[in-house]
Structure formats: structure tokens, C-alpha cells
């Protein structure tokens, strides 16, 4: 019913492939660059101690940091509903989910640190606006149904994007993604279940769920990034096997997955031109507004200022915790 069982199977397969790769040797390559290329070609993993081109390192730092920041900023829209969840059970589930996002942020900062950049530097870059986070978290959560739509659509899009990252050529990122995808699939299911409950409730509840899907559909499609023709990094990232599919390929996969799920929910996707294309064996759909995506990425979305102000405030308020933890670690090491 949730539609992500196949994706979870792909995560299992990627985990198996990772174990296999660890046992294989890459031979017949002299020189650092040749070795790097041979490892990628053999679907082996590049590890932190291996030589890598500077641009590979920079691309990974940019992508993993942006991903980590997204997990941390992504706690805000949902955190907004913890104190207003409709029952104790819903509240406990949401609390656990938001806590999971913090954990994902930590795995990802740790993966980025293996590339020679410190977590402090990364956080500083986020706070100074020198690194980005996902566009999607600049939209407001206006009703409880938005918690459901975030789970179904936002986490659903995140999984479709992230499952191929379990096969990323950089070992620490691939390993972090396996764990994250397993947890993320629960997140998607909890959102789906919230929407299913609302969609099968009173007329008012169903309307709330529909309104929420109407608002989150296109921003979720935009999460996959600009169309392939405008994607600056895709070609190189795919050659390095960091990305395995293009932005448009993943967006299409997400649309195809959602259509059936929307039918089970009894909700409508807000796209009058959505229809099955027999020739392509895929759904035709209306593209999101990429000018809006550009505006949101460059800081002019509905909630950018609020999200960053909140993050800066939380960072400043947490200074004493970081200092105390550092002092305690120093004392223990003595
Ligand atoms: N938002 O060349 P392109 C989650 C930027 S949610 C902001 O196609 P690339 C979660 C891009 O960085 C999601 N910026 O880039 C779920 C680049 O920037 P520069 C987090 C975007 O990297 C629930 C420029 O536009 N997931 O985890 O090849 C709760 C050109 O794009 C966006 C990830 O981060 C966007 N939507 O492909 C909590 C997954 N799209 O060069 C958390 C990992 C593009 O100007 N990331 N840009 O600095 C990726 O897979 C890829 O980085 C992307 C973009 C597919 C997002």
C-alpha cells in the first residue's frame, strides 16, 4: 500500500553490493589518477585515504553538506506541529521522526568530515549563507495535514533521490545513505498513513488533506533540481558515479510512483495534464515552476528568512552546550 517496498529492496541490494565491493581488488592501474578512475569504473568505493581529484572532493563536500543542512533545517517545518499534534500517539511518532532527521544530519556531517572539512566550518557556511539546503524547507506547514504531505511527498521524493545514492562511488556517503534510506522509508509511511486517515475521515478532514497535497506537489517535484538541460553538475557527477540518474529521470520515477498511491488515498494530484503515455510507459505531467525554484534557492522563498533566523538563534543558544561538551571531552581525555 505504501509503494516503497521496491525501493527498500534496492537499498538491500546496494548494501550487498557494498559488501561485495569491499572484497574485490582493483588491479592493473598505475598512478593515482589511473587508480581513481579504475576504482570508479569497477564500481568499487573511493575511501577517505584514497587520492581523489580536487573537484571530486569539492563536489562531494557541496552535495553532502547541502544534504546534511537539509536534514537539520528540515526539522523546523515539522517541529512546528509537535506541540499541536492531534493525539499523544501522533506526537510521539512526530517527535521520533524529527529526532531521526537530526541523526541523519549527524551521519552526513560525519561523512563530509572524512573529506577534510570540519563540521564547524560546514555549519558556519550554512549560517553565513555560503552553502544551501533543499528548497522544499522554505515552504510553510499551515495545517496538521501538511505533516502527512511532507511524509508522503517530501520524504517520498527524498527516498527516490537517495536510494541511488546508496550506490554512490564515495564509500562513507554510500554507507550513510543506506541507513538513512531505511529510516526514511518509515517516515514516508507515517506521512502516508496520516493522509490516509484524513482522506477517509470527515469531509472537512478530506478537504484538509487535499489542500495540503495541492500545496506540496509542485515544490516536491522541484526538489529533484533543475531540468537536465540546466543542471550544472549532473554530467560530471554521473561520470564519477556520485549521481546514478539525472534529475529528470528521478522526477519521472517519483511521479509514476505517486499516481497509484494517490488513487489508494482517494486524493487527486493537482495536475490536469497528468496522463499515462503508452509509448513512453510513463506518465506525462506538468513541470514545476523552475523560476520559482531559482528564487527559493537564492533566498527568496516564503520562509527562507524565518528558517535561517531560527537556525542562527538555535546555534547561538546552544553555544553553552557545545562548550560544556568540549570541556567534558577534554577532561575525559586527560
Ligand atoms: N534545493 O546541477 P544541479 C531530505 C542547486 S530532503 C536547493 O542539478 P546537483 C529530508 C544545486 O545544489 C533533500 N538547491 O545540482 C527529507 C546546484 O547548486 P550550486 C535533501 C538545489 O547537485 C525530509 C544548482 O542548484 N537531499 O533529505 O547535481 C525531512 C544546480 O543544480 C536544489 C539531498 O540533498 C534544491 N531542490 O543535483 C528532512 C540529496 N536542486 O552549484 C530531510 C543529495 C538543485 O549553485 N543531493 N539545487 O551550488 C542531490 O541529490 C543533488 O545535490 C540534487 C541537485 C539532486 C539536489
Image (spheres, helix red, strand yellow):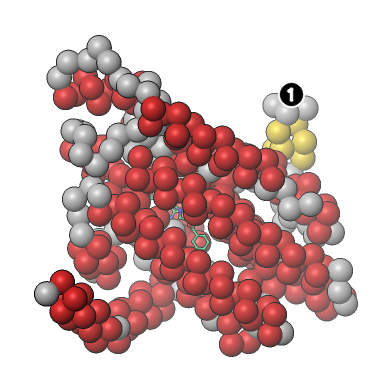
Asked whether, in this view, residue 214 is left or right of residue 18, the answer is right
Which class describes the residues within 10 Å of circle 1: few (<14), some (14-19), or many (20+)?
few
Q: Is residue 47 above or below residue 268?
A: above
Q: Quadrant of the C terminus?
A: bottom left
Q: Is residue 305 above or below residue 183?
A: below
Tell me what residue is drawn at x 68 percent, y 65 percent.
190
Q: As drawn, which residue projects farthest toward the left?
A: 334
Tell me what residue is drawn at x 79 percent, y 65 percent.
196
Tell me what residue is drawn at x 49 percent, y 31 percent.
17
Ligand 1: does it lie within 8 Å of the C-beta at label 1? Answer: no
Asked whether, in this view, residue 40 is left or right of residue 135, the answer is left
Task: Find residue 233 and report its image quarter.
Answer: top left
Name the residue beneath numbered marker 1: 279
Task: Find residue 266 and report its image quarter.
Answer: bottom right
Q: As drawn, which residue projects farthest toward the top?
A: 28
Tell me what residue is drawn at x 42 percent, y 50 percent.
176
Q: Is residue 318 above or below residue 282?
A: below
**Horizontal and vertical percent for residue 318?**
30, 83
**Horizontal and vertical percent for residue 66?**
36, 56
**The one of 286 and 78 positioned closer to us in this rendering:** 78
**Horizontal and vertical percent for residue 7?**
63, 42
Report whether residue 44 is seen: yes
Task: Find residue 257 and report its image quarter.
Answer: top right
Report whether residue 249 is seen: no
**The one of 204 and 323 positioned closer to us in this rendering:** 323
Number of marks in the rendered image: 1
Q: Secondary structure at mark 1?
A: loop
**Horizontal and vertical percent for residue 65?**
32, 56
Q: Is residue 18 above or below residue 135?
A: above
Amino acid at each position: 500500500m505504501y509503494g516503497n517496498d521496491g525501493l527498500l529492496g534496492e537499498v538491500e541490494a546496494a548494501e550487498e553490493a557494498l559488501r561485495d565491493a569491499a572484497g574485490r581488488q582493483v588491479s592493473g592501474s598505475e598512478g593515482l589518477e589511473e587508480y581513481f578512475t579504475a576504482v570508479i569504473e569497477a564500481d568499487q568505493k573511493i575511501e577517505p585515504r584514497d587520492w581523489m581529484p580536487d573537484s571530486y572532493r569539492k563536489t562531494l563536500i557541496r552535495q553532502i553538506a547541502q544534504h546534511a543542512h537539509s536534514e537539520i533545517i528540515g526539522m523546523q517545518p515539522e517541529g512546528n506541529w509537535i506541540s499541536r499534534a492531534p493525539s499523544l500517539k501522533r506526537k510521539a511518532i512526530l517527535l521520533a521522526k524529527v529526532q531521526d532527521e537530526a541523526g541523519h544530519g549527524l551521519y552526513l556531517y560525519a561523512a563530509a568530515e572524512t573529506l577534510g572539512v570540519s563540521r564547524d566550518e560546514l555549519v558556519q557556511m550554512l549560517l553565513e549563507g555560503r552553502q544551501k539546503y533543499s528548497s522544499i524547507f522554505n515552504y510553510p506547514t499551515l495545517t496538521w495535514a501538511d505533516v502527512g504531505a511532507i511524509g508522503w511527498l517530501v520524504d517520498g521524493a527524498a527516498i527516490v533521490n537517495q536510494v541511488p545514492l546508496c550506490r554512490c562511488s564515495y564509500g562513507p556517503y554510500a554507507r550513510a545513505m543506506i541507513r538513512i534510506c531505511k529510516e526514511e522509508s518509515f517516515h514516508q509511511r507515517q506521512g502516508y498513513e496520516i493522509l490516509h486517515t484524513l482522506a477517509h475521515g470527515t469531509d472537512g478532514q478530506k478537504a484538509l488533506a487535499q489542500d495540503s497535497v495541492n500545496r506540496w506537489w509542485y515544490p516536491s517535484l522541484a526538489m529533484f533540481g533543475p531540468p537536465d538541460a540546466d543542471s550544472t553538475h549532473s554530467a560530471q557527477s554521473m561520470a564519477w558515479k556520485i549521481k546514478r540518474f539525472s534529475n529528470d529521470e528521478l522526477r519521472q520515477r517519483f511521479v509514476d510512483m505517486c499516481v497509484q498511491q494517490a488513487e489508494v488515498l482517494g486524493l487527486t494530484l493537482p495536475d490536469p495534464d497528468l496522463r499515462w503515455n503508452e509509448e513512453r510507459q510513463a506518465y506525462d505531467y506538468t513541470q514545476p515552476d523552475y523560476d520559482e525554484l531559482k528564487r527559493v534557492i537564492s533566498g527568496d522563498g516564503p520562509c527562507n528568512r524565518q528558517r535561517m533566523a531560527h537556525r542562527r538563534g538555535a546555534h547561538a543558544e546552544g553555544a553553552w552546550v557545545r562548550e560544556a561538551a568540549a570541556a567534558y571531552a577534554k577532561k575525559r581525555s586527560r
